[in-house]
Amino acid sequence: MNLGPYTLFDIIDTGEGKLFQVTKIVFDLEARLNHTPDSTDGPLKDNTIKTCQEHNGEQVITIIQSIKEVRGYLNDNPGSTKRENQLKYLSNTLDHFVNWYKDEKLPMPDKLPAMEWKTGSFSANKDFSIINLDNKLYRLRRNQSKVVELLFKNLTDELDGLSYPELARELGLTNNSNSKLSNYFKDLPRVGDLFNHSRRTGKYSLKH
């Protein structure tokens, strides 16, 4: 189960131009609907409605999964006010996304792609373009997927990780004095979201 915070991506028209808006939706027991939305506007850059749709779709799927899980807990313990508050938060958070899809006249996502690779709390679809770690869903770019796939295989082969130069050599990544793994993970997910790093050996391993 994932209690967020969740983020809703949107593109808004101010009348003077378009802005990229990110609304963080935080679980808040003191709030009327058990959540507090907080929006931040920034430059549009390369973001499009498709960018928003991909990100929001991942959020929706995670929320729906979490709602199902909380409802299961409530079936086992109908009197739990803790689970009732969690369900209220998740349901009201989902409403923000439902409204966005309705406004954009887009279909709501309803299920995850098949996750074919699994170990511990980590799973990935066939080409590692979509991964789930600790109930958090991430959509990866091509080079990110390549790194995760290689470190997944390293993990399942019971090896002790790979350094950045080793990753670069295997995957054809940039490898010079300024090269580092974080260059490929500047936005979500960041390096620390997915990987453990040993200062002693300089090696990265996949969290699971």
Image (tube, rainbow, N blue to C red):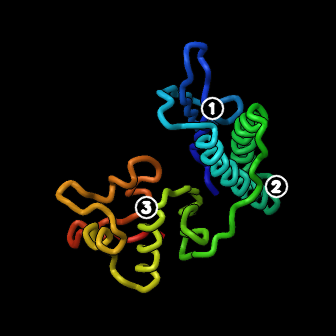
Q: Quadrant of residue 161?
A: bottom left
Q: Secondary structure at mark 1?
A: loop
Disc 3 crowd, CA 10 A, few/some/many (<14, 14-19, 20+): some
Q: Which residue is mark 3?
A: 143
User: Which label is found at residue 142?
Assistant: none
Q: Between label 3 and label 2, give the one nearer the viewer.
A: 3
- Indicate the amino acid at tag 1: Glu
| Quadrant of the drawing holding the N terminus | bottom right
| Position of residue 64 measured from the top left corner of the image (x, y, whole percent) | 73, 53
Q: Residues within 10 Å of mark 1 (few under 14, many from 20)?
A: few
Q: Are marks 1 and 3 in contact (CB under 8 Å)?
A: no
Query: Which element type, helix, strand or loop, lies under badge 2?
Result: loop
Kindly identify which residue carries mark 2.
78
Name the residue nearer the viewer: 185 or 49: 49
- Give the mark nearest the N terminus, 2 or 1: 1
Q: Are marks 3 and 2 in contact (CB under 8 Å)?
A: no
| Whether residue 92 is situated above or below residue 181 in the rendered picture | above
Which circle's residue, 3 or 2, is located before the other in the chain? 2
